[in-house]
Image: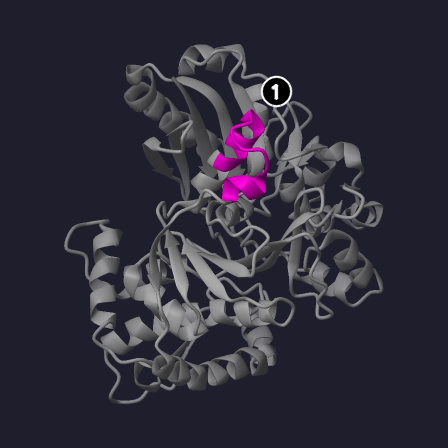
């Protein structure tokens, strides 16, 4: 019997799934690693810690779920979060931690390129909004502010490219992850010379560009022996977590959008055309030739609610964050729509779409003497979802969206899913497997194996498990509060900048 293993290198955890060739889950395991915020705007992770965690989780899954049942691993498909930047020396050894997507230290570089004629050219050629999340800007920041590391750099990699290199010795990157660097010309599928010039590097400092179906080399002999895998096990480079979450939700060339909420969040659509946005707010990431995932990401999501839970929740047992969050959700459900006039701006890590302001900060607005903890809990959830709605509203300017599919641990909570339906005033669907990233990676690997002829056919296999219908009266209430939320987010730009400068 053959099986497919998917490895998701997420923001806060590695999630590894095993599927049989019919897409039935054989087993899954997860391992966590931290993010370090040594000062405002800094967001880093230890690449070796991520790699070791991945090795540990993968070996346990193989030993406990795969080998005892005599499965043969046909392929291993990788996905990961986007916009990470890691510098390695000429031997492939990391020169410090990796910058994550949430790292905002390249703010000045973002302002510089936005204000120049180069800004329009870069957005139109790469499809990536000009924001400190972009590895192009992170590298440009390093060139000015960490010259020793910049000069010692052998390669600039994503976390996924680093992990794959450790396993196979190859330096490669798939098209979708390359788009997220802000340095890929999505029309020519080649590194953009102007982007390289701005970053101050040549193309030989970057991994080799490969299609998402590409084999990432042969697993090193030591890992073949350690994992009990054969030399013919395919190591697929795969794609980004966002693109695979969209595929795994069955949203492929349709009038539907997908909402993913894990630590961060995003709203995405898929089509064969780029969505041109004059305000440069929408990303357009290439998956395969003439197939684009378009949308907007938010820095806010389940991580924001986890922050609230850690600060203000009650812990029945030490470190039991899941139980604490569930208890808070039960309290929030007791408060009516609108949180009694309390609003929350969820910008704890700055913000990406649609305001693209790394200086944005969180705020509770409208507090009065009648507000209790329950109001703050519900306002926090509503604020996270208002921000996601603002991205959907932006996308709706370019493409009609008739329905939504939601995935991710936070989005799949029934209380939150119903709120999404009410806020968007659209039907919302949950697929049978809430972990759409792993399902998407399975579908990609299965298509590469010939089980499905195309990704369109693969996406068509996704089954709906549950649907939620919007309550129009709730939608009308939410929209009154959303108007204030949107106004505050836009009006406070100067104040955001001033408070960020003081920090």
The quadrant of the rendering that contains the N terminus is top left
* Nearer the observer, 439 or 146: 439
Percent coordinates x, y for residue 431 in the rendering: 38, 50
| Image quadrant assignment for residue 467 | bottom left
12 left or right of 188 in image: left
| Image quadrant assignment for residue 162 | top right
Residue ID at (32%, 24%) = 60
Percent coordinates x, y for residue 4 in the rendering: 44, 26
Residue 276 drawn above or below residue 378? above
Residue ID at (69%, 61%) = 275
* Nearer the observer, 385 or 112: 385
Q: How is the image coloured?
A: one colour
Residue 446 drawn above or below residue 323? above
Task: Return the residue found at the far bottom.
Answer: 369
* Nearer the observer, 71 or 297: 71
Q: Give neighbour class at mark 1: few <14, some 14-19, many 20+ (Cα, 10 Å).
A: some
Q: Which residue is mark 1?
A: 217
* Nearer the observer, 112 or 147: 112
* Magenta-highlighted residues: 443-459
Residue 217 drawn above or below residue 395? above
- Magenta region includes residue 451: yes
Residue ID at (24%, 49%) = 319
């Amino acid at each position: 019997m053959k099986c497919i293993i998917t490895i998701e290198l997420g923001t806060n955890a590695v999630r590894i799934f095993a599927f049989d060739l019919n897409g039935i889950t054989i087993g899954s395991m997860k391992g966590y690693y931290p993010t370090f915020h040594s000062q405002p705007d800094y967001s880093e992770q230890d690449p070796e810690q991520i790699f070791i965690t991945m090795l540990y989780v993968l070996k346990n899954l193989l030993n406990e779920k795969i080998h005892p049942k005599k499965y043969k691993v046909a392929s291993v498909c990788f996905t990961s979060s986007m916009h990470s930047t890691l510098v390695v020396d000429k031997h492939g050894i990391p020169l410090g931690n990796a910058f994550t997507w949430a790292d905002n230290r390249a703010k000045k570089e973002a302002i510089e390129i936005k204000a120049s004629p180069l800004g329009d050219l870069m957005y139109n050629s790469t499809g990536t909004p000009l924001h400190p999340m972009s590895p192009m800007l992170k590298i440009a920041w390093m060139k000015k502010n960490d010259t020793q590391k910049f000069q010692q750099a052998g390669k600039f990699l994503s976390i996924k490219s680093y992990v794959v290199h450790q396993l196979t010795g190859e330096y490669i990157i798939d098209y979708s992850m390359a788009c997220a660097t802000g340095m890929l010309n999505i029309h020519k599928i080649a590194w953009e010379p102007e982007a390289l010039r701005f970053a101050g590097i040549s193309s030989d400092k970057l991994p080799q560009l490969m299609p998402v179906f590409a084999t990432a080399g042969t697993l090193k002999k030591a890992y073949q022996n350690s994992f009990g895998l054969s030399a013919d096990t395919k190591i697929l480079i795969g794609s980004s977590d966002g693109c695979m979450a969209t595929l795994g939700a069955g949203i492929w060339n349709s009038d539907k959008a997908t909402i993913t909420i894990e630590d961060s969040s995003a709203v995405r659509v898929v089509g064969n055309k780029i969505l041109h946005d004059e305000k440069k707010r929408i990303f357009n990431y290439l998956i395969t030739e003439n197939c684009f995932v378009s949308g907007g990401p938010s820095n806010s999501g389940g991580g924001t609610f986890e922050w609230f839970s850690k600060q203000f929740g009650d812990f029945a047992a030490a470190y039991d964050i899941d139980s604490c969050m569930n208890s808070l959700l039960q309290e929030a459900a007791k408060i009516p729509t609108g949180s009694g006039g309390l609003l929350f701006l969820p910008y704890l890590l700055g913000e990406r779409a649609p305001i693209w302001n790394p200086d944005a900060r969180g705020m509770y607005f409208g507090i009065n003497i009648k507000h209790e903890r329950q109001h703050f809990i519900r306002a926090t959830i509503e604020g996270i979802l208002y921000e996601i709605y603002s991205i959907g509203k932006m996308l709706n300017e370019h493409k009609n969206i008739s329905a939504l599919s939601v995935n991710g641990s936070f989005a799949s909570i029934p209380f939150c899913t119903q709120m999404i339906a009410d806020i968007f005033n659209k039907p919302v669907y949950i697929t049978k497997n809430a972990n759409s990233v792993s399902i998407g990676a399975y579908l990609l690997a299965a298509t590469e194996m010939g089980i499905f002829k195309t990704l369109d056919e693969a996406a068509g296999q996704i089954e709906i498990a549950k649907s939620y219908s919007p309550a129009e009266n709730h939608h009308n209430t939410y929209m009154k509060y959303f108007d204030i939320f949107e106004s505050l987010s836009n009006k406070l730009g100067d104040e955001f900048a001033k408070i960020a400068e003081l920090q």
